[in-house]
Image (cartoon, rainbow, N blue to C red):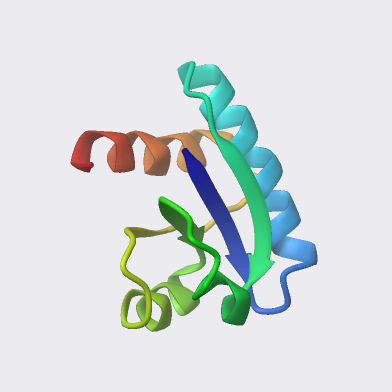
Amino acid sequence: MKALAVCGFGVGSSMILKMSLEKAFRELGISAEVENTDINDARGAGADVIFTSFELAEELRGSVNVPVYSVKRYMDVAEVKAAVEKYMSER
């Protein structure tokens, strides 16, 4: 599985979200490749799922064909883990 952590520029906050996603996937025993990227590159990245902020989620949902989940606090592994669990239950 390939997951994307997306922010506006693909550098700062998406890297933090990427690290939290990796930890969440690990804790759940799910094998996943997680990459961080900016919103423009996310549209053509070919991922299975995208995790991003509430602000960017709506924009992405209208332009990608994969599920998009929003996370408010990127460093909150429990919140990120809940988003991953929601994705896994809905796929």
From the top left corner, tell me how far across and down residue 63 is, in percent.
37, 81
| Count of marks overlaid on the render | 0
Residue 75: % across, % down: 66, 46
Q: Is residue 68 left or right of residue 4?
A: left
Q: Nearer the viewer, residue 64 or 17?
A: 64
Residue at 44% of width from left, 70% of height from top? 54
Q: Residue furthest left?
A: 90
| Vertical order, 76 against 26 (above or below) | below
Image quarter hosting the C terminus: top left
Looking at the picture, tell me which residue is in the foreground, 82 or 39. Answer: 39
Residue 80 in view (yes/no)? yes
At horizontal 61% and vertical 52% (from top left) the residue drawn is: 74
Left or right, residue 10 beside residue 5: right
In this view of the protein, which residue sits in the foreground, 83 or 64?
Answer: 64
Image x and y of residue 11, in percent: 79, 67
Position of residue 67 relative to residue 81, above or below, is below
**Residue under the image location 49 percent in, 75 percent down:** 43
Give the quadrant of residue 89: top left
- On screen, residue 68 versus residue 27, left or right, reads left
Q: Position of residue 56 (x, y in %)?
A: 48, 77
**Residue 76 visible from this viewpoint:** no
Question: Image height check: is 39 above or below 30?
Answer: below
Q: Residue at x 31, y 68 (%)?
A: 65
**Residue lying farthest to the right in this orientation:** 12
